[in-house]
Image (cartoon, helix red, strand yellow):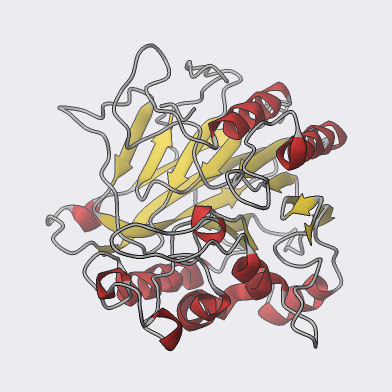
Amino acid sequence: MRRIARRTAVAVGAGALTLGAVASAYATSHHGSTNDWPYDQSASSVVAVVGDIGCEPNTPDNTGNPASLKCDGDDIGSFPAEYATADQIEAMQPTAVALLGDEQYQVGKLSDFENSFDKTYGAFKFLERPAPGNHEYYAYTKHGDNEAAQNGLGYFSYFNGTDANGAVRAQGQAGDDTANNQGWYSYNIGSWHFISLNAECDSDTFQHSCDPTSGLLGQETQWLAQDLAADHSPCTAAYWHQPTFTATGAAGTGPYAGFASNEGGAADAWWKLLYQHHADLVLNGHEHVYARFQPLDPAGYVDNHNGIRQFIVGTGGEDLDTLSTGQTLTNEHVVTGQDQAYGVMKLSLRNNGYGWDYQPALAATGAGPSAMSYSDSGSAVCHDSGD
C-alpha cells in the first residue's frame, strides 16, 4: 500500500572527482553487491537525485505508436525538459547520480534509451546508479499504445552493456541481471551507505508475485535484511521507484492517506527493515512531482526521532502529475512539494548528516509565473551519527 519537515539550514556543497579519475576507479569495481564508490574524501560529496526522465523518441521502432506520446507530442515533457534537468545535474558536479526509475518511456527499449535518454543523460552515464521503474519492466497499453513488456531487457542492455554476441552482461552498472538478482545492489560514498532496489514485482521476471516473503521478491527482501545487518555506516539511504507514501493520491483514513498498489507489499516490507536499522532517507519517483515528507515510521505516523524522511523526485523530464491539494496539501505528511516544473534534487552528504536543495530547471507548459520561484532546502543529522 502506498501511503501518504521543515529544517531551515540550507545545505550546500560540491565535491567530485575529475571525470577520468572516477571512470578509472569505476572500471575496477564490482557491482551487484556492496562496493565503495570513488569519491573525494576531502570535500562533502554531492548526489544528484531524480527519476521519470526520458521521453519516447520518434524513431522507426516507434512508428506505430501514438504521436502524442513521443518526444515531440503533446502528452510529455519532451527533450527540452530532459536537457534542462541534465544541464542542472552537470552544474552540480555530482559524485554520483541516483536514478529513481522510469529512466526511459514508454517501455524502455534499448533503442529508446539510445535515442532519448542517452542524448541527454548519457553525458554522465558513468556516474549513474540506477533503479528500474515500471516503464522498464511492464507493458504499456494506455492512450492508444500497445507495447510489450521489456522485463528489464533494454534497461540492463543500456546500463550493463552486451557482449560480442549481443547477450546482456550479467553484472554491471545497474547491478546483477541474473535469475536470482534483478538489479538490487548497494554502494558506499564516504560515511554513507546507499541501497538501490527493484520494486517491479508485477512482471514476468518476478512471476507477478509481490509477496516479500517468497519467490524472487522474497530473495530481494532477504538480501536487503542481510545488507542492512552487515552495514555499520552512520548514514543510510535507500531508493526504488514506487513510493510507500503518496503525494498525489487522495487522503484516506488514519495515517495512511494513500491507496493500494501491486508494489505496496514490497515498499511496506522494505520500510520496516530500513526503520529497524535506523535508515535516514528513502528516495522515490513514479509520481511526477517533487515532495518532501515528515519523518515517518512504518505505520505512517510522524516520528521525529527515528522516522525515515521520504523524498519523491519524479520531475526528470516526463509529463508532470498533480499534487493532491485542497486549501493545503491533502496528504498531511507532505511538508512541501511542487508540480509545475521539472528539476533535480541536490543531496549533499556530510559525515554525520545531509542537506537537500531542490530547485526547478524548467517550467512546465502552461505553468504559472511562480513555477520557477519554488525552492526547498534544509539539513538534518543521521540517526546513527552520535549527535
Position of residue 6 relative to residue 92, above or below, is: above
Count how many numbered circles sit on residues in the image. Answer: 0
Position of residue 279 relative to residue 322, above or below, is: above
For this rendering, which residue is in front, 38 or 14? 38
* Percent coordinates x, y for residue 106 in the rendering: 43, 65
- Would you say residue 233 is visible in this rendering? no
* Percent coordinates x, y for residue 43 in the rendering: 67, 58
Residue plotted at (45% across, 71% down): 86
Please identify the quarter of the rendering in which residue 85 is found: bottom left
* Percent coordinates x, y for residue 228 in the rendering: 79, 34
For this rendering, which residue is in front, 249 or 47? 249
For this rendering, which residue is in front, 382 or 205? 205
Residue closest to the far top: 254
Residue plotted at (41% across, 37% down): 292
Locate residue 89 relative to residue 82 in the image: left or right. Answer: right
Position of residue 54 relative to residue 64, above or below, is: above
Please identify the quarter of the rendering in which residue 213 is found: top right
Residue plotted at (16% across, 57% down): 367
* Percent coordinates x, y for residue 18 in the rendering: 68, 77
* Image quarter hosting the C terminus: top right
Residue plotted at (52% across, 32% down): 309
- Would you say residue 120 is visible in this rendering? yes
For this rendering, which residue is in front, 206 or 123? 206
Please identify the quarter of the rendering in which residue 73 is found: bottom left
